[in-house]
Every structure is written in structure tokens, then in C-alpha cells.
Image (cartoon, coloured by chain):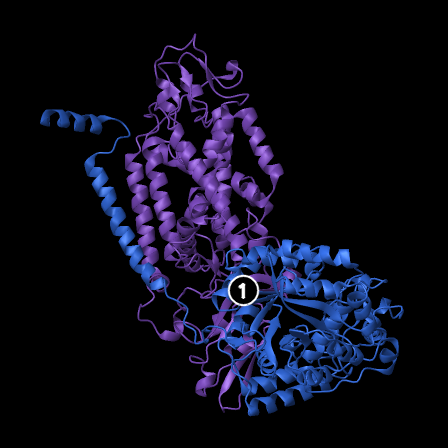
Chain colours: A purple, B blue
Amino acid sequence: MLRKIRTAAAIVVFTLACFLFVSGSLSVYFTWVIHAQLVPAILSGSLITAALLLSVTMLFGRLYCSVLCPLGILQDIFSRFGAAGRFQYSKGKPRMRLVFLLIFVTSLLAGTPIIFNLLEPYSAFGRIAAAILSPVWQLGINVLARIAEHYESYLVSATPVWIKGAASLTVALLTLLVIGWLSYRGGRSWCNTVCPVGTALGFLNRYALIHPRIKKADCVHCGICAKKCKASCIDSKKACIDASRCVVCLNCLDVCPKKALSYTVPKWLKTPGHHVHSTTELLRRNFAVAAAGTLATLLLKPASVFPDSGEVDALTRKRPYRRAVPVLPPGAHSLETFSDHCTGCQLCVSICPNQVLSVSGQLLEAPQPNLSFERGYCRPNCVDCSNVCPTGAIRPITLPEKSALQIGMAVAVPARCLLSQGEICVACSRNCPTAAIEKMEANDGKSYLTINTEHCTGCGACEYYCPIRPQAAIQVRGNDVQRLI
Amino acid sequence: MDDKSAKQNAANAEAPGRVSRRTFLKTAGIGVVGAAAITTGLVKLGQQEESDLPEPSEVTLRENPKNGDMISVLGFGFMRLPFLSGSSGPAPANGIIDEAAVFRMVDRAIESGVNYFDTAYVYHGGKSEVVLARALQRYRRDKIFISDKMPRMELDLAGAKEVFQTQLDRLQTDYIDYYMLHNQTTTEAYKAMYEESGILDYLLAEKEAGRIRNLGWSFHGDKECLEYLLSRPVEWDMALLQLNYHDLLHEYQAPPYVIARTSQPSPPKWNYERMMQTDIPLFVMEPLLGGRLGRLSRKAMAVLSQEKPRDSAASWAFRYAAGLPHVVGVLSGMTYMEHLDDNLRTFGPYSPLSEQEMTVLQNAVAIFVSQDVVRCTYCNYCIPCPYGIDIPAVFAHFNRYVDDEQVPKGERNADYEQARRAYLVGYDRSVAELSQAQRCTGCGKCVKLCPQWIDIPAEMSRLGRFAEQLRNEV
């Protein structure tokens, strides 16, 4: 019964988290899932949440890892197809765990985001959801839309499939590969060797009030529970549980033929045995589906992945490039404060309705997003990313603040600009939301753009609408520090 | 041995959760191919920004004729440091300085050859000196020139000694390169503070002892005071003056009411011409008139842009100030990296205004001063107002609408309704309800404090009435 409740809760959390990343809905019914994540809560300074999570752990054990952590649940899904039921006890690697925890904390304090970004579990999940799950979801929507179109229904409309940059895809795929592989063959071995949250909570778990215990008198050392333990923490020979690694999944409780394992009151334990299928076949099929999906995506939308696909120039998107100074999401203050807080979970990237946030071409740095204007610009009527950021890296701002917040400034490149070549163009000046751009005829007989730095907010409308390719003739440079103008 | 390893293999293959070699190679192969495919994509994405914005070279250095110091023409002023809240402009003494941002700016400035840093005891409530010391920690002291100032407070000799020692402690240094008597205004004040108390003799003794390398003053006062300073038998090594094209290219007449309430203002142009008769090296403060000339107005800016489409308004002001004879260095109170970058483009290297450019600048000034702007530089000397009016914010709001030609005019105008709404909403946003101009009592306390000689109560009444008028129209 307890196990079923745990499973049901985990399914709800995981579905909500996935839905949040693929749908971009900002309803509080979804967002509580991310506000309950431990590291983001600490980073954003919501200490009440953090204290609550820690005290729950002290009371009921590492439930967090089984129920609230989406990456943990993802691993459970993998191990269900893999080693489930064939786990074996292992000795744990306390020293390695401590080393990883130390590395994590040091990188947080020293401000080297690439390390703590990769280790933080919620963000690792976020990157997978944003880079892999989201395009697959969009593809599914498009298939539905095709069907709806065929029957002249307007129920579902097509959305463009967007693979958010090769860098984020690479990072997500590698994470998925490592996590997937480890959990497929060994259950929660990531959580109990690498994950810093797992190590920290595991330490508390040793002192938790309630956690699974073995009644030594009843134990016959049959080892059935150990086979079920995805954390590999039950030593059936000695009839003891390594509490620092137990994630309180409660899978062991039901299977003990002697009812020697208990979580609370042993009387509760009545077990409907459950059917485990052989799943190699299933996995193979799933993998084939996923591969086909990815391949189809690449074929359907070649422009987004292969920039030189020989289409008409004006109809290709501009190419992302590395800015002289990156433009950060409004509310991030400065690169320094931003990279100290952002765990690279990609939630803002997923929910950005204007598709300006991405992790473009910066694989060697952290998977932390910045703005790029190939698919839209940062519209003045939106502060979604600042509302959703769980770590406080993008601090909450209001719409009036946003309208006066300068995140960067446009810089014209006369060498590429049509005006300076005597052509007519109004693309940037007409579309500037603050009317900061003007065309001006200079004394040298040529026309130039003048940009009013008191009015320019760095929203990128000019760059987005500029007809010049592959890089626009007017480009936004991020401000060192964002400020109200 | 073979037998043993075969057994081992068999064991491996059997053990649950172990990887067979075949599976391992397969997985690894897929990984390598995938990574290679993605990396080729990455190379394409890793493009750099291509801009034709000129990259600045080293900042021009100038020799101080008095002592041979090679000083960067651009000096870094530490009076307008950025705050963590993200607010801009000269700020309250209790704000938290964004030190990380300051360090980034100082690093880039020094890297580009800036070597003159100006601070004062009173800037940012004393934090300016502390932050400057921290920012300069990693650099050799003998490659840097620090200028600091004795505050204009009621001090006796002991108090002055304590202040000077505090400054050395805050700056973590044994000597100050350029030391000034801050903000000289009237002869009486100068006599009382420096001559009668013996503070001047003390500072001269410190100079003898090498703890002050150069002694001078900064000036905001009247004609008599300047004459008096120059007539003293003291060898002044430097002077810091407010010099900018706005004040030098056009004469401003303060309203009679203001003149009556304060001492006779001495026009900057007169000051400069008087200093030209001496051989005291000059340093320039307020080259942008408190940032005002960095914004300018739309009409005036259009004139400048026509001549130099890519140059900022600020660059004109700096090039003008640095081109004045006797000037060694020009101070800029840079708040943001973008200010610094713009200045580095202006001074790396520095080129004086050509004759043609000087004419253009004169035209722009003529247009600028003919507009209805309040000549406020937002220096904040007038606040706190006893009735809580945010005087600089009121002026800033109005000036912004004048600069952009957005002041609502004429009810029959097609855009009138929109302009009116924009003006009022903007007013409420930038000035809190209880700090707006309508609440001015006209007490006149601010008039004495304004270094720009603005008739503040009159302007408050004008702008307050204007806002009320707009509000009352339906």
C-alpha cells in the first residue's frame, strides 16, 4: 500500500514536471514541483522550503529522492526496464560520495557553474526534458495537428519543432546516456555515488525517525529484498540496511516472505505481489521509436539543425553566434550574479513564449541560457522567465520594471547595413518598441542608424527583423549590469 | 592463464548488471559517432560576432608639466559607482556598492592604460575610498596615481589630521599623489578652515614629508575666492575645475533672485580664463555636466550625429574638455562598463576636435540651450528637501520629455491625449506621489545648495502647475 502511494505520488510529480517543460504552462498547479526542489530553493534563498524538505527527510527518510526528484524518478523508469528485480547488494562508496559533494559545494562557492550545473539533479532532468522531450512532444503535437487538419478540425494546431541548439542537445544526450545507463544496470547508483543532494540527504537519512528496518529475528537471509533494492543497500547476509543509501522506495517491504521488513507499523503490510515483465523487447521498441522520432525531426526541419540547406536566403533564420557581450534574461542583474545562481535547468528556455532564450554554442561553458534573436525578440509584455526561475538567478521583475529595464544596447554595423549602401530599409526602426532607432543622413552623404541609448532596452527586435544574414546589421550587446533607464 | 581469463569473462557475462565487451563496444561506438556528428554542428554554431565597431587601443597619456608624471587623459572618477539594486546615477550614501562590477571596470580600465583614479572622503559616505583601495589591490602602487580630497567640514587641526590618516588607512597606502582642498567656495570659508586653524600648514608639512605628492584644490566658488587662492604664497600643484562645452561655449545668466540669495557666481568661462594666466596644471571635473551632456536632447544630438554618426554625445564633450590648453586629465565618473567602453574608444587614442567639428558643436549647443530644459545636472546636492520633494527626479522627468520632444502641447494636436497620458504615467513612475513638485512650499532652502544656480522654487511651481493642468483636463 505504502509503496503504491509512493509510486502514485512519483508519477504525479514526474508528469507535472514533464508537462511544465513541454507545455510552457505557468499555472501554480505545475510550478510547485520546481519550487520544491532542494538546491534551487537554497540558491533562491527560500530557506523555509529548504528547511521543510530537510525536516521531512529527518522524519520520514529520503522520500525526496523517490517522490520529488524528477531525475530520481526518471532513473526508476529506466531501472524498471533494466535491472529491476535483479539488483544486488554493493558496498557503497562513501569516500567518492564525499568527494563529489565537496566538488559541488566548492564549485558553488567558487562560482564555477559548469561543475555544479552538471551535478545538480533537478537541472540535469530539466536539460533532458527541454532538449529531448520537448521536441519529441512538439513532433507529437504536429502529428495530431496533421490528423486534425485532415478532418478539418481546429482542435490542435501545429507548432514549430525547435531543437534548442546543439550544445544543450549534446549536454542533455550525454546526461541521459550516463544516467540512463547507470540506472538501467544498477538502479540508483548515480544517486548514491555522484549526486550531491543524495549524499547530503543520505547523511540525514541515517538519523531519520522512520525508515525501513529489518527485524533480525525474523530474517532468514533469503536475499529477496536485496534483489528488489534499487539502491543496492540491503545486506541480506547481515540483515542490515545502509540507511545513507536507502531512498525509501519501499519496494523491499512487500516482497519479504517473513514480513521482517517494516517502515512504520508492520501490521499494515499486506502485499499484492506485482508482475514484472521481461522488458528487453519493450526497451528495444521504445528506443526504435525515439530514434525514428529524432530522425524525422531532423528531416522535417532541416533549417534549424543544418544551417546551409540551400533554401532561399531571406527565408532562412539567422545563425546564432557568439556575442561580444552576452545578453542575459531580464532580471539576471549581471553575468557574475547570474552564473553564480543558475543551475542550467532550462525551465526558462522551455517556457519562453518568444523563443529567445537558449544555450547557443557554449558547450564549454555552463549550460546557462542567454538571449539570441533568431526566432523572436524579448517582448516588453512578458516576464515569464523571471517568474518561473526556481533558483533566483533571474530575479522576479514586474511588467512596468521590464519596460524600463535595459538588458543591452543595439550597435549598428554600417558595413553591412542597407542604408549605408544607399538602399531603403525601415525594418529595425519601424519595429523598435521604444522608437530608439532613427535613420539619419550624415554630412558625408550616407545614411546611418542612430540609436538612442537612453531608450534602447536591448530587446532585440531590430536584430530579429533585420534582413541581413547570417549576422544582422544591427546587433545587441549585453549590458555588463542590467539597469533601469 | 587463458583458462582463468575465460572463466572471468564467463563470470562477467553471467553476473547481472555487468557489461559484456560486445555491448560496451557497441555503446561506445554509438557515443563516439553521435558526439562527432554533434561537434561538427557545434563548429558552425561557434561563430563569433562580427562588428565593425572600432576596437580601442591604449589610452593616450599626457605629461604633467610640473612634475613629469605620465597621466592618462581619461581619469576614473569614483563618485558615481554602481549599486546592487540596479539603480543608476549618484546615489544615497546607504546604497550597497556593486563591488564586483567596479572591479571589472577598474581591471579593464587599467588594462587599457588608465592610471589616474579620483576619490574623496565624502563620496559614497566614505565607501568610495575603501572600494578604490580594494580595486587597486592587485596593481603596483607606483604605476597608479590616486587623487583624494580634504572634506569641507567643520574641522580643527586634530580633526583634519585624523581625517587624513583615515584616508591613508582606507586607501591602504603611504602617500596620495594628488591631494585637494575640496570644494572651495568663498574666501571666508577658506580662511576659516585652512588658514586660521593651521590645517594648510599641516598639509604643507605632509607634502614636505612626502605623504602628499601634489597639493591643490577643487573649485566651485566665486571670483573673489579664486583670486584669493591664487594670491596666496602657496605653490599650488594642481587645480580641479568644472569645465565643459556647455558652460564655456555659452554664457548663462542666473536669475536675479538666485544671485541675491547666494554669493555672486563666477562663470566657468571666467574661471578658466583666469587659470590660463597661471601655470597651474588643470584637471577637469563635470566634463559632462553631471551626465547631462551624455544625454543631450534629440535635436542637438541630431546635429552631432550628422557629423559623426557613430560617436556618442559623451565623446564630443570629452574631446572638447581634453582639448583645452593647460588641461592634463579629464575625470569621468563612470557607473557602468558601457560608459567605460565608450570612453576608451574616445581616448584610445585621443584626437582633438577639428575646426569643422568645433563649429558643429557650437551649433548643437545653440540648439540645446534654446530648448526649455531645466539646467539640472542631477548632482543631488539640493536633497534632502525638508518637505521630501525629489527635486532632481522631477527635473529629470521633465527634461527627458523635452529632450525627446514628447511634452504634451496643444489640445488640438492629434497626439495630445497620448502624450498627456505618457507624461503623467511616467511622472508617477519616476517620482513618488509624495515627492512630486506640487508639494513644494517655496521655502528656498535648496537655492543656496544648487551649484547650477537654478531657481528651484520657481521651477517647481512651473512644473507642478503643468502636471496639475494635465491631470485636470478630461
Q: In which image quadrant can residue B442 be found?
A: bottom right
Camera sees residue A195: no
Q: Which residue is mark 1?
A: B144
Q: Is residue B456 above or below residue A84?
A: below
* Left or right: residue A295 compared with residue B415: left
* Left or right: residue A208 compared with residue B370: left
Q: In which image quadrant can residue B124 be found?
A: bottom right
Q: Is residue B110 above or below residue A81?
A: below
Q: Chain letter of disc 1?
A: B
* Left or right: residue A406 compared with residue A166: right
Q: Is residue A442 above or below residue A454?
A: below
Camera sees residue B317: yes
Could you say which is closer to the camera, residue A113 or residue B223? B223
Q: Position of residue B146 (x, y in %)?
A: 59, 64
**At label 1, which amino acid type do we have?**
Ile
Q: Residue at x 56, y 92 (%)?
A: B356
Q: Is residue A441 above or below residue A145?
A: below
Q: Residue at x 52, y 13 (%)?
A: A267
Q: Position of residue A21 (x, y in %)?
A: 48, 49
Q: Residue at x 64, y 89 (%)?
A: B362
Q: Residue at x 58, y 81 (%)?
A: B316
Q: How many marks?
A: 1
